[in-house]
Amino acid sequence: MARQRARELGIELGSMETGKLNAITDVEGVGVGHSTLIEGESIRTGVTAIAPHKGNLIDEKVVAAVDLFNAYGKSTGLPQIIYEGVLETPIILTETLNTWRVADAVVDYHIERMGIEPSSLNVVVGETNGRYLTDSLSRHVGREHVFEALDIARSPSGKGRVPEGNVGGGTPMTGYGFKGGIGTSSRVGDGFTVGALVQLNCGNKEDLTIAGVPVGREVTLPKKPATSSGNSIMMIIATDLAIDSRQMWKVAKRAALGLARTGTYGGNVSGDFTIAFTTGRAPHLGDDDKFLNPIYKATVEATEEAVVNALFVAETMTGHLGHIRYALPIDQVGEIFSRYGRELH
Amino acid sequence: MARQRARELGIELGSMETGKLNAITDVEGVGVGHSTLIEGESIRTGVTAIAPHKGNLIDEKVVAAVDLFNAYGKSTGLPQIIYEGVLETPIILTETLNTWRVADAVVDYHIERMGIEPSSLNVVVGETNGRYLTDSLSRHVGREHVFEALDIARSPSGKGRVPEGNVGGGTPMTGYGFKGGIGTSSRVGDGFTVGALVQLNCGNKEDLTIAGVPVGREVTLPKKPATSSGNSIMMIIATDLAIDSRQMWKVAKRAALGLARTGTYGGNVSGDFTIAFTTGRAPHLGDDDKFLNPIYKATVEATEEAVVNALFVAETMTGHLGHIRYALPIDQVGEIFSRYGRELH
Amino acid sequence: MARQRARELGIELGSMETGKLNAITDVEGVGVGHSTLIEGESIRTGVTAIAPHKGNLIDEKVVAAVDLFNAYGKSTGLPQIIYEGVLETPIILTETLNTWRVADAVVDYHIERMGIEPSSLNVVVGETNGRYLTDSLSRHVGREHVFEALDIARSPSGKGRVPEGNVGGGTPMTGYGFKGGIGTSSRVGDGFTVGALVQLNCGNKEDLTIAGVPVGREVTLPKKPATSSGNSIMMIIATDLAIDSRQMWKVAKRAALGLARTGTYGGNVSGDFTIAFTTGRAPHLGDDDKFLNPIYKATVEATEEAVVNALFVAETMTGHLGHIRYALPIDQVGEIFSRYGRELH
Amino acid sequence: MARQRARELGIELGSMETGKLNAITDVEGVGVGHSTLIEGESIRTGVTAIAPHKGNLIDEKVVAAVDLFNAYGKSTGLPQIIYEGVLETPIILTETLNTWRVADAVVDYHIERMGIEPSSLNVVVGETNGRYLTDSLSRHVGREHVFEALDIARSPSGKGRVPEGNVGGGTPMTGYGFKGGIGTSSRVGDGFTVGALVQLNCGNKEDLTIAGVPVGREVTLPKKPATSSGNSIMMIIATDLAIDSRQMWKVAKRAALGLARTGTYGGNVSGDFTIAFTTGRAPHLGDDDKFLNPIYKATVEATEEAVVNALFVAETMTGHLGHIRYALPIDQVGEIFSRYGRELH
């Protein structure tokens, strides 16, 4: 069975409608770019960039917020978002030990590509740990990959369908003991679109739940996943709803609820971070926040589906030290779903 | 079909073992007391007390922490727990507008019943809003109910089986559009027991998920639940694992993941609070926190099951203004479970 | 020498201009009411109410924020302010063990005086501990005092000069070993007014610093202050600048810097809380926050001066168990100031 | 007048005793290393390393905490400290845009110098912005400077007197419009030593207050400081008191009070961060936290004095674009102190 996204297989998560692409790029203006580096037997890494708009974020900041569900992680730039409530650079996702050279390259990009000489720059890089499949210590990701991912994210080609699975920052990642990586999804509500993009690298096999079905417990793999089964997840939430940073933060907190539906208990060395932004401007304040309920629900659903899409799309990968991470076997999933009263296409 | 707890019906949530009573009282020393006030057509309220031990908590404080997943709520005493890392009174649960007179009665209890003249006292009262079934404005709960609940919680009779459903603070509460209230559960791991007790008053009917089965969407009720369908949940976590307050806080955060498994997206006016404490003493610090993984998992499972137990045990109630809140119809649940590949006893 | 405010004596704190009354009531619409209860030898207590406007805050909420510098304290309502970013009741200040019956009386006030039947109400009561001079355990403050303070705060008479020192919630309080209580001050900047009102009950005598002069170390008292020298401070900040809750929070954090200028190191059982609100509406978002600098500076200065005013105005008080708390001896302060190169009027 | 530390000139800040060196290195085991890079007309930068002990922190972590008073800044590694409560690398201070390449070099250092192959590493780098005197955009700091600073900090030579002023990360920094940079101080209490080290780059001239004397207002400079007068301060607190992370956090919060005594109101683009750690092990928990009062006081005093020392020791510097930052003129300070009733040596 070829790799397909969950919804193409007939799996519906939640009840709200998706956007046209069922991707974070359904939020007008948002672009995503991947630079994927797969070389020899030990290099399986990359960079993913998410740009809120194609312009210069320093001059046109977007309202943003973060939720630190479990801040075991090296992400940069998060404290300033909490205090200033804005994002002033695109968000970059990569592998743990590359974090800082990637961040440094973002400065280069501003100077060299954008012609900006920033006096200060709150570079936002998120990471998860890919060492099971890639030679992390060598930190292979550099300027060229950051430039490539940012160039795509800021161009028209970054605004369409989003490649998922073993791409960009998600290249070597593991989800629930299966091959993980990048996944995305979106929801459309009354007056807003919300999109989620995750770099999935967390969870234990036995906990994986899809649409309420205990898939992880029932699937058999050629080999039990190594205990170094990965950890951490970066969750990026984008919307066009005009809200302020405090409201965006409450939306961001719901991403963890979507993640929870896929079964994880939030392992201690799992950095479970959410970074959320809105391209909406001029929030109307003064009312109470009840109007946020639909976007909370949409965020939970889109996050859940982004996690599941990462698992459905990512393909089996062999990497560093001959380690293998198996893709979620979709045929088995179909059988298990049948036993639990649900039919896939 | 008589009201039974989820596990008695054959529903297993998670994979860890429960304690002997499958209740928060499985944690040695912890006691629970309810005072339930049901009178006439409009009074459906009460008080639930959770005592970490039978002694004087001012002199023998327990390590504690709180998680404010969504702090729309009036709970008292939480900021001081965050800073001091201890609990110095039992925890009391009641209905929103009773919060403060209940808190005041806790001071009375210390003076009159315990012979203590506190110079300061961090009274901890949690609340959810029961106005759909009870005449909230009249604030019927008073000293005698607080005294009764505390007396029981601190006595041997509070250390056994915990009444669930329409009792104590949970009396008028609603869960996912059904009759909610008090629920409890526990898990036993290697070297620790963890228990959860919830006062369930949140969620929309269509979102209710039990063991992954979309029960809320499929159950039919005599009447669609009123939109004033309740909100908020108080989650109390108790353990005997010797950990410090920062670690306890990370455990507390996992309760929201257990709640998420039952389907809610965390409504804006839902106060989703967790208060956690440990009776363990002398934590061994200096190691990393990976040893917490089993208690995280246990906390997720116990919280999920406590929520489900509240729904299974609570009975249909008619109250204020003739409002009716229907119990979760267990026979229908059985049929729905069958359709989703799971059989109840 | 009669009791006078610091500025009347020629003490200038900071460099910005004060408002007309040099009081929190310089912020248009803000009212303050005290109910002071001094009876017999042991009752020295009361209630202070601060109303952002005279209307119904449930329908016309004001943007608000809190800073928990050291949350050893029993204040109610703070978590919800953090999440919802608004104040929906006036702020009440009282003595520790009265906190909850005062909060309950605020509900009564809404029902009985304002004709509102709240389905939920986030009552905000702050407290400091006055037990050295008053019989705290008996909790003498009740409905009538809350009603009186709120009636004044919401009437024209609450919008003028603010009584300071031994009034309202500040009646039995101690500041830096001297008689403390209520103090207020304000600053006017370009396009905004900011006011501070404190209920001062913290600090050790030897640390008191006024305008940089080590007054506490040099003043002699008839008797060394008892070690039970009080603790905690409630700081209320009001402005009319149209900002959002996140920005208001950053303003609130500056109050602790103003407090620090008066010498305290923030004792462990000192609850140092700031509650801040703005009557401004429709904040213009999207710019960066540099425009906040003047209001930060103004907040530091107004808070510092409010603390000092409490000490200058409060008079020596004898109370419970014959305890005496001496007023700051202004004549000595004049001499000390002279020695440090500063002359009072 | 030669540059001298404040205390050598007779300025006493606070009342507690200093350690032998009046430096952060008075805390047993703590080492500090600077690498200073001054070249040509435009390069004025460097790196400062603070090592809690000379060993491998990954295996022997120290309990740590952070306070984000105003998190406008790019510091790395702080979220994980909040959650895990430990420091697993030395702390590095540098200039803003160098942050990430410095962080990357810390990984190199672990691999190449320490022979460690970390699977993950929470690199902690703090920064302030030195662009007024150095060509920030070129990011001149690299591996060799990080290696040099770390080598010193971990060697016996890093455990003695700490060079202050225009050294290491502090090289191009500005304090209150004067030349700023690195400063340190310590206090000894009953059973503990606490040390502070700051990289001072914040404040406006007119606000500078030393020992309560309004020095900034009264000092005249050859030229009014450029408005781009710098911003941000990194405050590092070290102790040997055996406390847990929550307690360490409460200590860390007091650093801002020490800073406040020197006059700043906390400008919006001032990143005011405190990172605190203890070399003490096996905290005795269960008691209340009142025993922390002396270390709170000590922290306030040591931080205040560290700030003042930076100003007293730093010398006038000319740098990038011919910009000049003048040293605090000590002779004028002497005269001003005299007018305010205080004599310097």
Image (spheres, coloured by chain):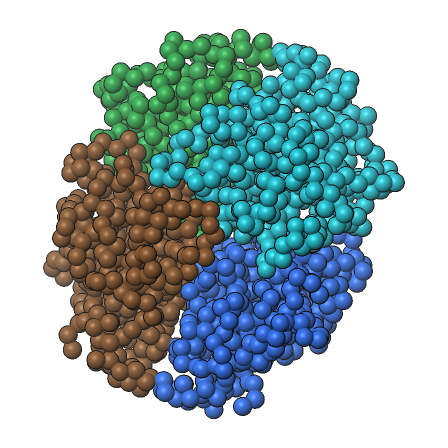
Chain colours: A brown, B blue, C cyan, D green
- Which residue is rendered at x = 71% and y = 69% of the image? B149
- Which residue is rendered at x = 43% and y = 40% of the image? C282
Q: Is residue A44 visible?
A: no
Q: Where does the image place residue D154, in percent across and percent down from the top left?
A: 38, 38
Q: Is residue D278 above or below residue B9?
A: above
Nearer to the camera, D343 or A338: A338
Farthest residue, direction left = A40
Is A279 displayed left or right of D191 in the figure? left
Nearer to the camera, C286 or A328: C286
Farthest residue, direction front = C115
Q: Is residue B333 above or below residue C98?
A: below
How many numbered dots are placed on residues in this image?
A: 0
Q: Where does the image place residue A334, in percent across and percent down from the top left?
A: 24, 81
Nearer to the camera, C147 or B273: C147
- Which residue is rendered at x = 54% and y = 90% of the image? B1
Q: Is residue B245 above or below residue D230?
A: below
Quarter of the image for residue D105 reads: top left
Q: Is residue C344 visible?
A: yes
Q: Where does the image place residue D95, in percent across and percent down from the top left?
A: 32, 32
Q: Where does the image place residue D60, in percent across and percent down from the top left?
A: 43, 50
Quarter of the image for residue A45 reads: bottom left
In which quadrant is the C terminus of chain D drawn?
A: top right
- Which residue is rendered at x = 45% and y = 19% of the image? D205
In which quadrant is the N terminus of chain D drawn?
A: top left
Nearer to the camera, C120 or A308: C120
Is C199 displayed left or right of A160 in the figure? right
Is D121 displayed left or right of D66 in the figure? left
